[in-house]
Image (cartoon, helix red, strand yellow):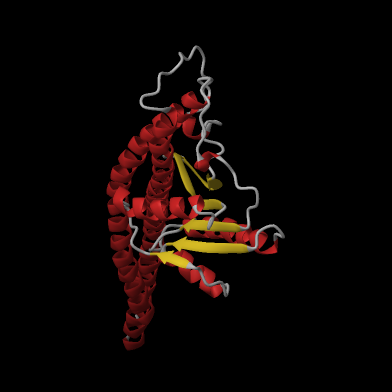
């Protein structure tokens, strides 16, 4: 009897957990669809800006911009890590933080990098680095599944000013890049300087042929001074959007697997409960028959 009650209690507990995981799966699915639409739209905008700057660079005009030029010495390097504020998303955070920590150790051991700085977005990443006895120089926890351009624009503007004034020589980022529903990968990229503005990032690698000469009004420098910073801001914003949609996909997959495991455990426990009841009834019948035989 006690065993049957214990099994029923466990089955009831698993059913309650299944309701939670199923609900989280449905919520993640809805959030994923919204986040994916924003990421796809941002990708198109970023590709267009990248292609525009690349076309200007190969149009035959003498164009240049400080953000397109690497500094002679790269002593001040900032590593930006994009993790999540919440868990229950499988190996999403673990994959990012392993790559980020390895890169951070490389920066610390590098002879050329005198002042490495670590910036972490997400509570999971902050907790991880503090556990590793690494104190980030700056942290962000305001980004959820709907990062806004205004929030990212403030951060991007700070990095632009630091790079133009020489306080920052290189900006690196580690995040999960969104390719499709079935493919997301942790990547380590360099955002500043924008030396690879036309080298084929985000699908903008198509060879440019037959580009007509441009007439710049009022000048090429004034156009680049507007387009290049916006291109960097768009690329940084796209990184945050990719991280958001990848997190929702990881959580959706993890909660789906948890729900299926709960179904399997409930089925197993139900069979165990039935066997326990059958054994109990058989024992009671045996005792009853034995008592009747004893009375004869």
Residue under the image location 27 percent in, 47 percent down: 30
Q: In the picture shown, does residue 210 fall above or below 115? A: above
Most foreground residue, 126 or 33:
126
What residue sits 50% from the left and 38% below the top?
65
In the rendered image of this protein, does residue 153 appear above or below residue 203? below
**Residue occupying the far front of the picture:** 218
Viewer-proximal residue, 23 or 188?
A: 188
Image spot of residue 207 (x, y percent): 54, 20
Q: Where on the picture, by quarter, is residue 89?
A: bottom left
Counting every numbered tag in the picture gives 0
In the picture as drawn, the residue positioned furthest to the bottom comes out as: 295
Q: Is residue 281 visible?
A: no
Q: Residue 253, how many percent across, how many down? A: 41, 50
Res. 81 in view: yes
Residue 73 at what x, y percent from top left?
65, 52
Q: Is residue 285 left or right of residue 133?
A: left
Toward the viewer: 7 or 43? 43
| Residue ranking furthest to the right | 111
Locate the N terminus and report the quarter of the image it occupies.
Answer: bottom left
Quadrant in the picture for the C terminus:
bottom left
Image position, residue 26 (x, y; %): 28, 51
Q: Nearer the viewer, residue 47 or 289?
A: 47
């Amino acid at each position: 009897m006690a065993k049957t009650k214990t099994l029923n209690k466990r089955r009831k507990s698993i059913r309650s957990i299944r309701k939670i995981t199923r609900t989280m799966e449905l919520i993640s699915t809805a959030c994923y669809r919204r986040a994916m639409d924003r990421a796809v739209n941002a990708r198109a905008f970023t590709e267009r800006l990248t292609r525009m700057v690349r076309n200007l660079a190969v149009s035959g005009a003498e164009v240049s911009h400080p953000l397109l030029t690497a500094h002679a010495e790269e002593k001040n390097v900032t590593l930006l890590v994009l993790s999540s504020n919440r868990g229950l998303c499988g190996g999403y955070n673990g994959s990012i933080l392993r790559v980020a920590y390895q890169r951070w150790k490389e920066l610390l051991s590098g002879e050329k990098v005198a002042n490495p700085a670590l910036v972490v977005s997400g509570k999971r990443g902050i907790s991880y680095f503090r556990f590793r006895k690494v104190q980030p120089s700056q942290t962000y926890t305001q980004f959820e599944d709907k990062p806004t351009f205004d929030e990212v624009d403030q951060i991007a503007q700070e990095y632009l000013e630091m790079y133009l004034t020489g306080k920052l020589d290189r900006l690196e980022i580690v995040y999960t890049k969104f390719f499709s529903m079935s493919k997301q990968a942790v990547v380590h990229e360099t955002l500043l300087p924008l030396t690879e503005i036309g080298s084929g990032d985000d699908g903008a690698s198509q060879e440019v042929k037959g580009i007509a000469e441009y007439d710049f009004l009022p000048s090429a420098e004034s156009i680049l001074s507007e387009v290049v910073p916006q291109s960097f801001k768009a690329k940084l914003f796209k990184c945050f959007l990719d991280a958001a949609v990848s997190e929702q996909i990881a959580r959706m997959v993890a909660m789906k697997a948890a729900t299926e495991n709960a179904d399997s455990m409930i089925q197993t426990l139900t069979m165990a409960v039935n066997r326990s009841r059958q054994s109990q009834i058989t024992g009671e019948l045996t005792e009853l028959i034995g008592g009747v035989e004893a009375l004869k």
